[in-house]
Amino acid sequence: EAGTLRRRGVAGARLVALGARGGDGSVDAEFLKQVLREIKELVVLQKSEDETLMRLVASMDEVLVEKNEIVVRQGEKDSSMYIVAEGEVVLELTKAESAGPLTRPVTRGGYFGAVEVLGKTPQKVTARAAQRSRLWRIDSNKFDDIIFGGAQPAAEAVDEDEDGEGDEGEDGGSCSATALREIFIVSDSTAESAKVSVQTALRQFDYCLQKTCGVNRTVVYRFVRTIKEVEEIVGRAGEADALVVFTVMETNLHEALIAACKKQKVEYCDLWGGLLDSLEKKFGAKRSGITGRKQAVNEEYMKIVKAIEYTRKVDDGVLPNAWGECDIMLIGPSRAGKTPLAFYLAQRGFKVANYPLVPDEEAPPELFKLDQNKCFALTINPEKLRAIRVERMKQFGRSNTQYADMSAVKKEVSWIKTFYIRKGPTWPVIDTSDAGVVETASRIMEILDRRKGDSLAAAYVSMD
């Protein structure tokens, strides 16, 4: 069992003796600032001023742990982030379907708890010291106070504008780039449909998020079962000035949620309310109020199952003799996102094969015997590809390999572009550098549909 963690705040020493060597922790200031700036889950830090980051650094607590001591446990309500300064910590993720925990070592400059500190959620992993280690910790309250609490009111922001006008919205106000805009998603089921809908809608504000629209934080409450839970969630939303977006089917909970929002003057959006009202009119019947849905085992469902099985069987370039059966063939360098993209498409009924290109290695002839309209070429910029590979190597405790060497990666990407021109001149080339799986899959499906004609020609009947 873990002993008591020893923590000491060194804010004063750090600021007084910035850059000094010694055991007081002051030497870590610049190191911590650099790590904070590079945390990919906390985009708001990448846009923060150095002064703000140094305030965050100054608020952090030092944590000393002995070998085998536990820093945090998976599921623990400790919404803090930790950065490793010395030693090694092993992160353990336990999944129900796994025989044992999945592990990953984290050494100097590594971190865990970034999502937790932003979303104020329980820890996703157990962190255990592999040796005597020194870490720095920031809790979510301090993080919010420094990053979001300093946002100026609209009037003050306008006063500071050089021409005295400021950037105004429809209501005449403006906001800081770090102003926190919270959205609470509430569901009596998995909340997946609501979360996807909100994420899709938020893309319409990419141009101003972390700029003039502030910073978004989404908190998901799922499997809500009681009116007491509903009232507490709405109470929290009122305190946070959050927008409540919900998909609640159970009638009593649905009514209680709307009533609570109206009573506490909390802005809300009943995501399915309008659709269900329209369906009631169309069918001349009332909604059942039953939570969740039963998956119909029909022809469409079995098509998806077969597509997933096929995609698993031919993943990573194996079984070229089976490629003729595929609906889509993905070609691209290692770590360009072929496998997750393939399985995402498979879950939509496409049989997907993929082939990882290796410079100067002859591609199997089966690749060129395929209907070339099935082929899609993936590309990625060298910097992004190297970053992904470096992270991959860290998971295996390796570094300094040709696989992630910048000059080697640049040559590889250049070779691949030439390969596409010579061997696949008709293949659509899709850049995955700044595109997620969903966006890339949508692009592929759009290309396939447009080959049939317009959206009318590409329409299909869903059996679900």
Image (cartoon, rainbow, N blue to C red):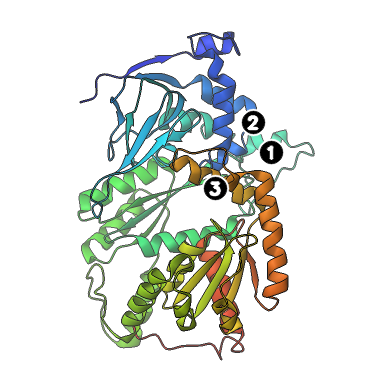
The residue mark sitting in front, 2 or 1, is 2
Q: Along the line of sight, which residue is nearer the eye, 169 or 415?
A: 415
Could you tell me the amino acid type at mark 3? Arg
Name, please, the residue furthest toward the right: 163
Q: Along the line of sight, which residue is nearer the eye, 382 or 125?
A: 382
Compared with 177, 416 (above or below) is: below
10 Å crowding of disc 2: few (<14), some (14-19), many (20+): few
SS label for mark 3: helix
What residue is pinned by disc 1? Answer: 158
What residue is pinned by disc 3? Answer: 389
Could you tell me the amino acid type at mark 1? Val
Could you tell me the amino acid type at mark 2? Glu
The x and y percentages for residue 17 are 58, 8
10 Å crowding of disc 1: few (<14), some (14-19), many (20+): some
The x and y percentages for residue 9 are 43, 15
Marks 2 and 3, how far apart at CA? 29 Å
SS label for mark 2: loop
Residue at x 46% of width, y 62% of height: 340
What residue is pinned by disc 2? Answer: 49
SS label for mark 1: helix
* Image quadrant where residue 390 sits: top right
Compared with 49, 325 (above or below) is: below
Q: Along the line of sight, which residue is nearer the eye, 247 or 361?
A: 361
Q: Is residue 303 left or right of residue 410?
A: left
Q: Along the line of sight, which residue is nearer the eye, 249 or 41?
A: 41
Marks 3 and 1, how far apart at CA? 45 Å
Residue at x 44% of width, y 77% of height: 351
The x and y percentages for residue 220 are 36, 51
